[in-house]
Amino acid sequence: MNERQLEYFKQKLLMWKEDILRESRETLSHLQKETENHPDLADRASSETDRALELRTRDRQRKLISKIDEALRRIEDGSYGYCEETGEPIGLARLDARPIATLSLEAQERHERRERVHRDD
């Protein structure tokens, strides 16, 4: 992968991270404002369900940020774009679709097949 491509993925990852952080700040602000008590039990239950879903989403995004940071570290150390399992280059189309990918498409498919087989046991 050349320098221009690496810079493209670095910027893509940084923008993705900033978007997630911005959304998290908005969620935090929204949750702080949304501390009202609902006299109706159905309204209260609906509000709690929405809050739980939002917090679960933010937790997944927190984990995603750590994967983005790992990808940025791989760009810096020169290992970005190479499959952790085979050492082969990961396709640019796969990286464009999933910039945090650590496995080539073939290795990822093998991994998912193994998971499926073991999960069915």
Image: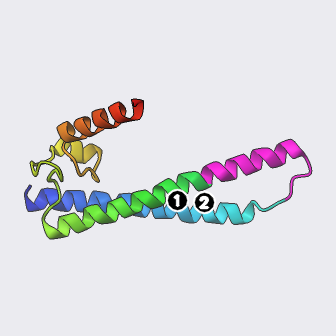
Residue shown at 15% from the left, 46% from the top: 90
- Residue occupying the point 24% across, 46% down: 96
Please say if 119 is above or below 74: above
Q: Residue at x 78, y 62 (%)?
A: 35
Q: Could you say where residue 106 lies in the image, as x and y percent from the top left?
A: 18, 37
Residue furthest front in the image: 121
What residue did someone put label 2 on? 27
Would you name the residue on which mark 1 appears? 23
* Quarter where residue 69 is shown: bottom left
Q: Nearer the viewer, residue 1 or 45?
A: 45
| Residue 24 % position (x, y) | 54, 62
Q: Which residues are magenta?
A: 37-54
Q: Quick one: 19 or 37, which is closer to the camera? A: 37
Based on the picture, tell me whether residue 49 belongs to the magenta stretch.
yes
- Quadrant of image for the C terminus: top left
Question: In the structure shown, which secondary structural element does the residue marked by tag 1 occupy?
Answer: helix
| Amino acid type, mark 1 | Glu
Q: Is residue 103 left or right of residue 54?
A: left
